Image (cartoon, coloured by chain):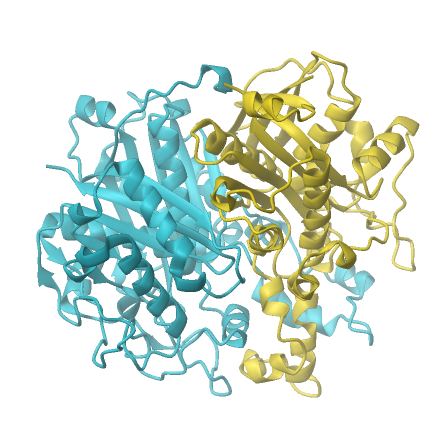
Amino acid sequence: MSIAITGAGLITPAGLTLAENAARLAAGTMAQPDTSGKGERFARVAEFALEPRLRYPKNLKFMSRAVQLGMMAALDALDASGMRVVGAPTGRIAVHTACGETGMENEEFFGAYALAWQGREADFKYLNARAAKMVDPYFSLRTLTNAGSGLIAMELGLNGPSCHFVHGETCGAMALEGACYDLLDDRCDVALCGAYDNLATAATWIAYDGMGLARPKGELLLSEGAAFLVLERIAEARARGAQVLGEIVGVDVRSGAGAAGCEPADFEVGRRAYRCVTGYLGAATALAELAMGLERADSGQVGVFRSESWCGFTAAITVKAE
Amino acid sequence: MQPFHTVTTARQRVVITGLGLTTALGRGVETCWPKLIAGESGIRPISYFDCSEHATKVSAEARDVPCDPEVPGMPPAQMRRAVRMFSSVVEEAWRQAKVDPATIPAEQVGLSVGSSTNYIDVRLVGPVWEMRHSDKQVDWERVAASGIADAAHFYRRQGDMMGAAAARLLGIRGLMLSTDTACAASAHAIGLAYQAVRRGQARVMIAGGSTALARPLSILAFALLGALSKGTTAEAARPFDKKRDGFVMGEGAGAVVLETLESALERGVPILAEVHGYGCTTSGYTLTDPSPGGRWEARAMEMALSEAGWRPDEVDYVAAHGTSTQKNDATETQSIKAVFGEHARKLLVSSNKGHIGHTISAAGVCNVVFTVKGMWERVAPPTLNLRNPDPECDLDYVPNVGREARIRKALCNAFAFGGQNVSLALRKWE
């Protein structure tokens, strides 16, 4: 038994769709950093319209920037797969997501700080819920790390197995592994899996700057983006006439650099070039590279997409292109 | 890497051979357990900050957190509080399981961690606030020049530090999984570890979670949702009581060592329990409310029972999520009734949130550890502060006093904000 990829969605500073990303990468076009008076610190995704695509647009207020990017990529992946989830057995569709530098950000709390601390000392005793509620009653939900998987499930009406992984750059591979094994163990019939990240924030930049990693002191151009895949057991995908983009051969995440899996990398699609085009996406990187690799690969090529986290973990995803 | 085409339907039996725990009741399973059964509460006035202007007055803070867990190559300053707590519980579980690195290759030992990575370094909050422009955007140049963020800050905020610290401490080189599904995170971590051992991806997995959210920004965020109790005493958390008004934020960490039955027998270590099933769903309803009628919470329990091959009437005990919120406790009761039918009236059901608060990402592993202890000590843990019966919560919750009971088969529940529901099926090893 093996796992088929039948849909992919990708949104990065290099493009709002998988096709746009592929075109920018082929052309070697750099992402455009935000230069609006603050230096070239970030690569940002161009403006996009999510609200018109939502079945429940009122949920937009619960979505952080990273989750919005994830929702765009998830909807694109599902559209590309030709899968119709409405009317399907919702308990048999899994949702596995991942993110890295996402969750609480100081700016989310600035409204609360302003009400609590304006004109007096920055003491936590003033930072009560009453002050925060006058600013934005929804910000605390936007800080839920696993809100993305919940919101995607709500939007699409999904009730199957679900998990959210947070593990630096390797977490996208964990989400993929969870989804694959749910399919292999017959716990679901379809799995939507992906990663989203937004590193273009003050709190993230402060942390990376402190290590001398982020621009302008360092070389990393902090970025944002998301990648999602639709997975099915290959026999069932073929039976419904779906286009199979690729076949996942194996996924592994291990403690210790270099511990994870095999080496052949026939279509690694110029990892460095990819990073130059999209910036540093963190958690979404491995899946984004995978989606790009599929878009550019020749039939039968086998590729390994690796990611390594700052704390010493290594992930590998092996894929065969159709 | 195990290529998927080699995955077979052969499944290993998975047993628990080690436990570790830190809660507001103390450090170590043998410290926490007698206090749990004696009905002691770890809920006290918040000590971390002045809460005089807050509606939330109490929390269940862990009071014995190691300052320096002596993790090789990892300075203590790089480890946030939750990471330090987790390091202590994995050591405890590891000692009990007597895993000998000389006999089990490091590559066959894996880790599965449930964490709450929503983290802001509170030491930076004031300075960052001071270094803002009038439009409330951060003044980048001042921040960069100030040097307030260093390497320790960078690593404290990394989502994989909990796994990294445990891996270095124990010399683990195998499979790594790290979940963050809020209140279900450590239950997910145990469920995923169980699956990995069951299908042969690892011989041994250490799984659990840790949380340290009894801090001002976390309390602010949860208070804003109306989820926290406004009580001012140790009785603020009162699961299934009619007067319950929210949960009390708890701190804690727990870990279990899972391994194949074959491995445990070969090593000759005491086996504590067997994991028989894992159920997992998403409600797809709202971010904070249970699913209507508890349908998808019930489905998670049914999945665990189905995987275990158990009839509902074989189950003796349910370690409830039981947060002490109006909606959770009533809906969990509904879901238990839906799964167990008439047998629900004979079940023992209890929640430890009245003792240790809601330990969020450690809540699932706390349920598992206390359930395994209950199996061996032949005691069903009590639900504290349950004095006012609620017609919507009409099961046997073992109110206030632990009860002698023979627990052979049990379910452990964990349901999350965000909609993820997890249930684990455990059987006493006999």
A5 left or right of B210?
A: right
Q: Is residue B276 left or right of residue B8?
A: left
Which quarter of the figure is the C terminus of chain A placed in?
A: top right
Q: In this orientation, which residue lies closer to the viewer: A211 or A292? A: A292
Q: Position of residue B105 (x, y in %)?
A: 36, 21
Q: Nearer the viewer, residue A318 or A182?
A: A182
- In the rendered image, residue B281, in percent from the top left (x then y), is placed at 44, 48
Is residue B157 shown above or below B124?
above
Q: Classify B94 as above or below B391.
A: above
Q: Residue A281 appears in which quarter of the rendering? A: top right
Judging depth in this view, the residue of A209 and A69 nearest the camera is: A69
- Count the marks: 0
Image point 49% across, 30% down: which residue?
A183
Say if A237 sits above or below B188 in the image: above
At x 77%, y 46%, the residue is: A223
On the image, the x and y values in percent for residue A63 come to 66, 60
Identify the residue at horizontal 19%, vertical 24% (top origin): B267
Q: Which chain is cyan?
A: B
Q: Which chain is yellow?
A: A
From the top left corner, tell me how far across and down residue B154 is, in percent.
Answer: 62, 50
